[in-house]
Image (cartoon, grey):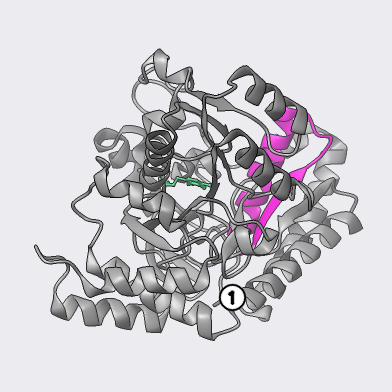
């Protein structure tokens, strides 16, 4: 069995973070409780290629990929050079940055629906702009939405008590794949639907689903919005819309377009996008040039090199390797979804055992130098080598073999092996929530 790693520095810093930062982290999914608190690193010191080194000096092959933004690999030389070059010229000024035009041009070249583009910093900000645009253009209020779009009021109505209740009337969630519930919502809000918004991040809803959505949106005069924050520059160069052969009216890109720099893009058909000219949609940092320079370099690499093919090949190697390793030892675990963005799941375990089984996997994989995320999505990058993925699968073989025996013995056996602790916030313990 490999030696346990020390996370002492991470744990000490996080103890202080809890006194300074509500929840201790900026992203809910990055709270240590979302991983394996006490048995998993918390802070990074360096990130390079497909690897991360934590502040205790432990190195890992990283498949968390900053939750998606790192598509080429950390510190990708051509991207970092572009950032450095722009840094020499200035980060932002009262004049606009030429890179705004250059990146919009590249988006138009690479993304089917992207006749025009506007830039934002976060994904949620750009999806909120898409919603506002759809409502302005149609003069209607209701948005039918499948999936997570970010924290703005428009998307968290009915979810967070901090959002006015009235907003919930204008947002109807639905589940991707099933047609009847969506048809029922369309009937319920006849003549009131501004947009249908979806992302397809885990399971393919069937080849005819997206064309059906396209037809449905056209039929009711609503806009079709694809949230390509995860699928963009990953599933295909032109994202889900290229992969599925269906162009939406609007699409949002973020993770993956600037290899970690904070940039999001709202793109769409010119007729639709021009409505933004008069809209109250404006931010100070949309023309921040370091991120735009990174996006330009990232997209040029996507255009000129076999990035997508490599992400698919490495992802397939990972997915098949993990699933086979689990099957061989009779562990009810499989890696599913799209190869460049692997989801992972246990089946048939009760909720508590599943939680602990994940804790065990994260803890033991970290001990063996691999960072994974509970359930996913886990991301391969262009910098991961075949040997990296082989090493991940080899580590998983050991961990799964041990876990399969423990699961046979029962929940207590798994629990006894966990080094995970509860987080003491000083007020109450909190559990990790998704996103
Ligand atoms: C599909 C999808 N949409 C929107 C968002 C929100 O993006 P951001 O966190 O940059 O606001 C995310 C983030 O996880 C996402 O995965």
Which residue occupies 68% across, 51% down?
343
Query: Residue 92: within the magenta?
Result: no
- In the picture provided, is 282 more to the left or to the right than 61? left
Among the 4 quarters of the image, the one containing residue 61: bottom right
Residue furthest left as drawn: 94
The answer to whether residue 396 is above or below residue 173 is below
Which is more toward the observer, 39 or 314? 314
The answer to whether residue 384 is above or below residue 275 is below
Which is more toward the observer, 115 or 348? 115
Residue 367 seen from this side: no
Magenta residues? 341-369
- In the picture provided, is 161 more to the left or to the right than 174? left
Which residue occupies 53% across, 39% down?
148
User: Where residue 332 sits: x, y (%)?
Assistant: 84, 45
Residue 283 seen from this side: yes
How packed mark 1 is, by other alpha carbons closer than 10 Å (few <14, some 14-19, many 20 or more), is many
Among the 4 quarters of the image, the one containing residue 80: bottom left
Query: Residue 344: within the magenta?
Result: yes
Dot 1 lies on which element?
A: loop
- The quadrant of the image that shows the N terminus is bottom right
Q: Which residue has dot 1 on it? A: 384
User: Where residue 124 sits: x, y (%)?
Assistant: 40, 43
Which residue occupies 46% across, 58% down?
255
User: Where residue 58 sits: x, y (%)?
Assistant: 47, 65
User: Where residue 356 sits: x, y (%)?
Assistant: 68, 37
Which is more toward the observer, 307 or 236? 236
Which residue occupies 68% across, 29% down?
182
Among the 4 quarters of the image, the one containing residue 340: bottom right
């Amino acid at each position: 069995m490999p030696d346990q790693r020390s996370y002492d520095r991470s744990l000490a810093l996080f103890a202080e973070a809890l006194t300074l930062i509500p929840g201790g982290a900026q992203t809910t999914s990055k709270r240590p409780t979302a991983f394996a608190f006490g048995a998993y690193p918390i802070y990074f010191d360096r990130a390079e290629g497909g690897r991360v080194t934590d502040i205790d000096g432990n190195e890992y092959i990283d498949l968390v990929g900053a939750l998606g933004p790192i598509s080429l690999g950390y510190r990708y030389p051509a991207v970092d050079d572009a950032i450095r070059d722009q840094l020499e010229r200035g980060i932002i000024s009262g004049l606009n940055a030429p890179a705004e035009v250059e990146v919009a041009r590249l988006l138009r070249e690479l993304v089917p629906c992207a006749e025009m583009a506007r830039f934002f910093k976060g994904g949620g900000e750009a999806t909120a702009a898409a919603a506002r645009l759809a409502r302005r253009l149609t003069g209607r209020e209701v948005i039918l939405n499948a999936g997570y779009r970010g924290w703005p009021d428009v998307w968290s109505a009915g979810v967070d008590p901090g959002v006015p209740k009235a907003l919930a009337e204008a947002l109807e969630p639905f589940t991707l794949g099933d047609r009847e519930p969506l048809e029922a919502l369309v009937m319920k809000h006849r003549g009131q639907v501004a947009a249908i918004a979806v992302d397809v991040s885990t399971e393919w809803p069937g080849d005819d689903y997206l064309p059906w959505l396209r037809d449905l949106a056209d039929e009711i005069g609503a806009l079709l919005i694809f949230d390509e924050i995860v699928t963009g520059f990953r599933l295909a160069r032109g994202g889900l819309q290229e992969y599925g052969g269906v162009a939406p009216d609007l699409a949002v890109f973020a993770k993956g377009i600037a290899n970690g720099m904070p940039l999001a893009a709202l793109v769409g058909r010119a007729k639709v996008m021009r409505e933004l000219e008069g809209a109250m949609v404006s931010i100070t940092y949309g023309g921040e040039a370091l991120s735009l320079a990174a996006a330009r370099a990232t997209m040029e690499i996507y255009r000129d090199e076999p990035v997508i093919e490599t992400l698919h090949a490495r992802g397939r190697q990972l997915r098949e390797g993990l699933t086979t390793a689990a099957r061989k030892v009779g562990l009810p675990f499989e890696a599913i979804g799209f190869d460049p963005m692997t989801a992972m799941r246990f089946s048939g375990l009760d909720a508590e055992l599943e939680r602990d089984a994940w804790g065990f996997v994260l803890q033991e994989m970290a001990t063996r130098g691999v960072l994974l995320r509970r359930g996913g999505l886990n991301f391969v990058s262009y910098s991961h080598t075949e040997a990296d993925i082989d090493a991940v699968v080899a580590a998983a073989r050991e961990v799964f073999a041990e876990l399969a025996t423990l699961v046979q013995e029962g929940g207590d056996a798994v629990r006894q092996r966990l080094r995970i602790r509860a987080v003491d916030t000083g007020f109450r313990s909190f559990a990790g929530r998704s996103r």
